[in-house]
Amino acid sequence: MISRSESLEIAENDYIVSRKGRKKNLMLKDKSKSIKMNDWGNIILDDISIIAEILDNSSNVYSDSVSRMRERLNFPELTISAKILDTLTGKHKSYLDFGSEIAQSNKTYYEEQKRAHNKNWNIIKGEVERSIKEQSQLDSDTQGSFDSFLDKYFDM
């Protein structure tokens, strides 16, 4: 079980990494001792790589995954977030425009897939139909208080 002080330390480290994770030589706390984020990350990945090697059997799927994570830890410009920031700042796009482009690209990709090869097609189609039906019911249900609306909404 994690103690209250460990929980607070984890929360503080999480906050620091989320706000300053690209800062070179970023320092975190480990049991009240300071440690560089990259050093600590590599220690953790060293431990995980032992397990990955055991799980690999005849393939290197797990070890390769750990290697990719290590590359991203040591070269943050390889992370998805860095690529997004580079696109937003380098191409002077708004976050909304960028999100819309990704959505359109994903939509086009999935629409071009043969339905037989898209194992998620029926799931997505069912979700769309369910969502439209629910929205229609919500639109037609004009009776009731806002509190009952919230109760129904959070029970979904």
Image: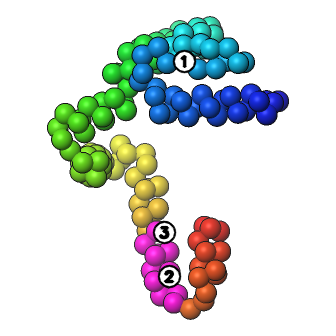
Residue bearing mark 2: 137
Q: Are marks 2 and 3 in contact (CB under 8 Å)?
A: no
Mark 1 → mark 3, Cα distance in angstroms: 48 Å
Q: Is residue 61 visible?
A: no
Q: Are marks 1 and 2 in contact (CB under 8 Å)?
A: no
Residue shown at 70% from the left, 18% from the top: 32
User: Does residue 136 show up magenta in the picture?
Assistant: yes
Percent across and percent down for residue 134 are 50, 74
Horizontal side of 62 relative to 154 (left or right) equals left
Horizontal side of 29 relative to 77 (left or right) equals right
Q: Is residue 87 above or below residue 73?
A: below
Question: What amino acid is labelled 3 in the image?
Answer: Arg
Residue shown at 49% from the left, 18% from the top: 26
Residue bearing mark 3: 130
Mark 2, other Cα within 10 Å: few <14 / some 14–19 / many ≥20: few
Percent across and percent down for residue 33 are 67, 14
Q: Is residue 134 visible?
A: yes
Quadrant of the rendered structure where residue 148 is? bottom right
Q: In front of the other: label 1 or label 3?
A: 1
Residue shown at 70% from the left, 33% from the top: 8
Judged from the image, the secondary structure of the residue bearing numbered disc 1 is strand
Q: Which residues are magenta?
A: 131-142
Sequence-earlier tag: 1 or 2: 1
Q: Are marks 1 and 3 in contact (CB under 8 Å)?
A: no
Judged from the image, the secondary structure of the residue bearing numbered disc 2 is helix
Percent across and percent down for residue 41 are 55, 15
Residue 27 image label? 1
Mark 1 → mark 2, Cα distance in angstroms: 52 Å
